[in-house]
Image: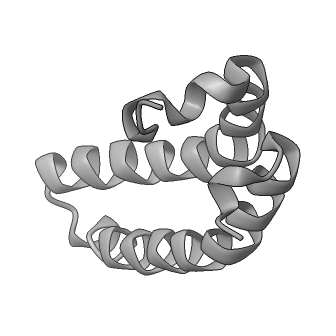
Amino acid sequence: MNIKQKDIQFAMTESMKNMGSVIMSAAVILAGTFAAMLPSGVLSLLQIATLVLTGLLLYALVVLPLFVPVMVKLFGSANWFPFKRKE
């Protein structure tokens, strides 16, 4: 059975289980890359690295675990509207 045919709560739980580790590992790799710019001392690199690291922290700690599930639950079955076949 397709995940789209199940209820929203189950689909959200499964997608967070399957994709959460992939997205979080990509965020950690990107954070490590930009954190390497911090010791350089160049002002523009410090600003870019600080903004990217702040954005990654906000995304990893607020948006992904809190905002996305709330919006999916709020929209309900409207989450699938671009992909539904007309019957």
Residue 60 is situated, as x and y percent measured from the top left of the image, at 62, 53
Q: Is residue 14 above or below residue 42?
A: below
Specify the color scheme: one colour
The image shows residue 85, relative to residue 43, as above or below, that is: above
Front-most of residues 75 and 52: 75
Instruction: Name the residue: 66% across, 37% down.
Output: 68
Q: Is residue 53 left or right of residue 65?
A: left
Whether residue 24 sits left or right of residue 53 in the image: it is: right
29 over 84 or under it: above or below: below
Name the side, left or right, on which 56 lies relative to 60.
left
Q: Quadrant of residue 34?
A: bottom left
Q: Image point 47% across, 32% down: which residue?
A: 87
> In this orientation, which residue lies closer to the viewer: 6 or 18?
6
Residue 55 x/y as whole percent: 45, 43
Decide which of 23, 31 is in the foreground and name it: 23
Residue pictured at 66% horizontal, 69% vertical: 20
- The quadrant in which residue 42 appears is bottom left
